[in-house]
Amino acid sequence: MVVDPGDAQPVLAALQREGLQLQSILVTHHHGDHTAGIEPLRKATAAPVYGPATEAIPGPLTGLADGDQVSLLGVVFSVLLLPGHTAGHIAFYADDIDGAPLLFCGDTLFSGGCGRLFEGTPAQMLASLDRLAALPAATRVCCTHEYTLSNLKFALEIEPDNAALRQYHARCLELRARGLPTLPAALGLELQINPFLRSRVPAVIAAAQRHDATLTNQSGAFACLRQWKNGYQ
């Protein structure tokens, strides 16, 4: 299976190289960098497409809603509706793949960060992240972009004294220097280092208040962080 194929060519090359047949295409939301490869892959492989029922995904499509389950290659995935990045964004969660939970979360959660709010509100995105945070700590987080180092630069601005964050940053620098991905991320570690999962932590609230002196309560901290990150260099 392939998740969020923004480009068909790397997928087709991998199928040929590994001698594999594509059985299914999973899609988390409608943005072109997640969907542009669907039609070429469908034409080349006849693989069925599974995606959010409420978003404009190239059909034919098996539309999925919150709470649905789909069995693919012997693995049962639960569908989680996660509005925020887009209105109908979904994730695919499996309790056990090779001994641990696995999450395909698209652009909702990144290592050290979260997606921009193109169609949802801060409250919606925070609720979506809370839902992911409640998954088992051993969950492997498979997001769709390698944004980790830029996200961690911002996270260190928020919590410069976070020892787990500093250690993780050093490890990710080493991985990227070797041409290796930082992903999948570990949810348990994200709860220790990701400011968008930690917007209720006093140190994170204090950083948000230093950035925006008008912020008077913790409920606004997440929105402040997301807006701050939008323009952060």
Image (spheres, rainbow, N blue to C red):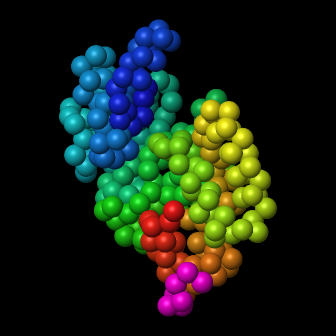
User: Residue 121, position in %: x, y?
Assistant: 37, 70
Examine the structure image and report whether residue 213 is included in the region drawn in magenta: yes
Q: Residue at 28%, 16% (x, y): give it.
A: 44
Left or right? Give the position of 48 relative to 135.
Answer: left
Label tally = 0
| Identity of the residue furthest to the top in this view | 19
User: Residue 212, position in %: x, y?
Assistant: 52, 84
- Can you say whether 217 is above or below 92 in the image? below
| Highlighted magenta segment, given as a residue range | 210-216
User: Residue 31, position in %: x, y?
Assistant: 31, 46
Nearest the viewer among 26 and 226 is 226
Nearest the viewer among 83 and 40 is 40
Q: Quadrant of residue 164?
A: bottom right
Nearest the viewer among 62 and 197 is 197
Left or right? Give the position of 49 relative to 170.
Answer: left
Q: Can I make out residue 26 in this image? A: no
Q: Quadrant of residue 35?
A: top left
Left or right? Give the position of 60 relative to 29.
Answer: left
- Give the quarter of the figure containing the N terminus: top left
Left or right? Give the position of 141 relative to 64.
Answer: right
Examine the structure image and report whether residue 58 is included in the region drawn in magenta: no
- Can you say whether 71 is above or below 200 in the image? above
User: Residue 69, position in %: x, y?
Assistant: 42, 40
Q: Residue at 62%, 78% (x, y): give it.
A: 207
Q: Can I make out residue 108 in this image? A: yes
Q: Residue at 36%, 23% (x, y): give it.
A: 9
Q: Residue at 47%, 47% (x, y): give it.
A: 105
- Can you say whether 15 is above or below 155 in the image? above
Q: Which secondary structure type mostly characterizes the magenta part of the structure?
A: loop
